[in-house]
């Protein structure tokens, strides 16, 4: 009987010990390995919303902020609906980078995701988040990129050039428009019957399917999880 009680006690101690270790690992994972991301967008925000929904249940990647340079951008409505804090800044504020840096630091942001963000990222910010700012472009870079190449202008240019293919490019961001290292591309066909609108729909479907997953892959690879 005595031996049985001792065994039960030992088993209980053993279970408590391993439960504590498990809780400690969960604690470490949450407080050390969790990465916060901020999304910057200038307009509609369909990618921003898709990224937020994708990471909503993630235990290691959190969307903590949505920033915009456009106080009328529809992405603000989406941020409110998703209950994600948003902030508005001017082009000068971005270029000076003092206030924007402060808000990113206060929120412990490790990665910045551009989703239809139209301003150039200043050198200071590129250096501070080297290899940690990611953008998506709605065409196959290096073609159809650069200043003025956004939204319908990209798709119009692709159609006018009679390209057989278009798609998406996910790339790291440097201080030039659409010129950072390419991480991932996915193609779609451009048919004779396509117009800028139908091509935009095909490209948007690729963006929705690929961008959040690739963001997760890049963060995990960078952080060596
Ligand atoms: C997307 O096509 C994206 O590739 C580009 O800007 C567009 C943004 O659309 N960078 P939305 O604001 O996410 O709807």
Image: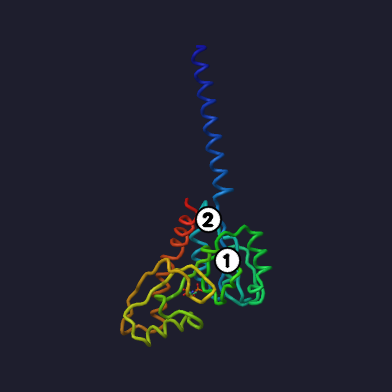
What secondary structure is marked by label 1? helix
> In the depicted view, which residue is nearer to us: 222 or 215?
222
> Crowdedness of circle 2 by 10 Å Cα count: few (<14), some, many (20+)?
many
Exactly how many numbered labels are in the figure?
2
Q: Residue lying at the far bottom in this picture: please name it.
A: 160
Residue at screen point 55% across, 39% down: 23
> Crowdedness of circle 1 by 10 Å Cα count: few (<14), some, many (20+)?
few
Is 91 on the left-hand or right-hand side of 19?
right
Contact? badges 1 and 2 (CB < 8 Å)? no
Residue at screen point 51% across, 70% down: 173
Query: To which quarter of the image does residue 82 belong?
Result: bottom right
x and y percentages locating residue 90 in the rendered image: 65, 76
Is 66 on the left-hand or right-hand side of 187?
right
In this picture, is 39 found above or below 149?
above
Q: Earlier in the sequence, mark 1 or mark 2?
A: 2
> In the depicted view, which residue is nearer to us: 86 or 132?
132
Q: Pointer 2: what residue? A: 61
What secondary structure is marked by label 2? strand
Q: Identify the mark at residue 127; answer none if there is no mark.
A: 1
Residue at screen point 33% across, 85% down: 162
């Amino acid at each position: 009987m005595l031996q049985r009680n001792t065994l039960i006690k030992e088993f209980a101690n053993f279970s408590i010990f391993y439960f504590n270790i498990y809780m400690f690992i969960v604690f470490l994972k949450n407080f050390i390995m969790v990465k916060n991301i901020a999304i910057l967008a200038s307009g509609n925000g369909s990618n921003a919303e898709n990224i937020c929904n994708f990471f909503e249940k993630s235990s290691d990647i959190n969307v903590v902020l949505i920033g915009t340079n456009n106080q009328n951008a529809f992405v603000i409505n989406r941020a409110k609906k998703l209950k994600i804090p948003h902030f508005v800044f001017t082009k000068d504020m971005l270029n000076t980078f003092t206030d924007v840096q402060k808000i990113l630091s206060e929120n412990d942001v490790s990665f910045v995701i551009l989703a239809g963000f139209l301003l150039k990222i200043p050198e200071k910010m590129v250096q501070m988040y080297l290899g940690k700012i990611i953008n998506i472009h709605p065409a196959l870079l290096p073609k159809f990129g650069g200043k003025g190449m956004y939204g319908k202008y990209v798709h119009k240019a692709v159609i006018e050039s009679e390209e057989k293919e278009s798609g998406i490019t996910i790339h790291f961001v440097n201080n030039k428009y659409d010129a950072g290292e390419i991480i991932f591309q996915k193609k779609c066909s451009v048919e004779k019957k396509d117009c800028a609108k139908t091509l935009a729909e095909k490209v948007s479907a690729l963006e929705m399917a690929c961008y959040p997953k690739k963001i997760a892959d890049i963060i995990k690879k960078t952080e060596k999880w």
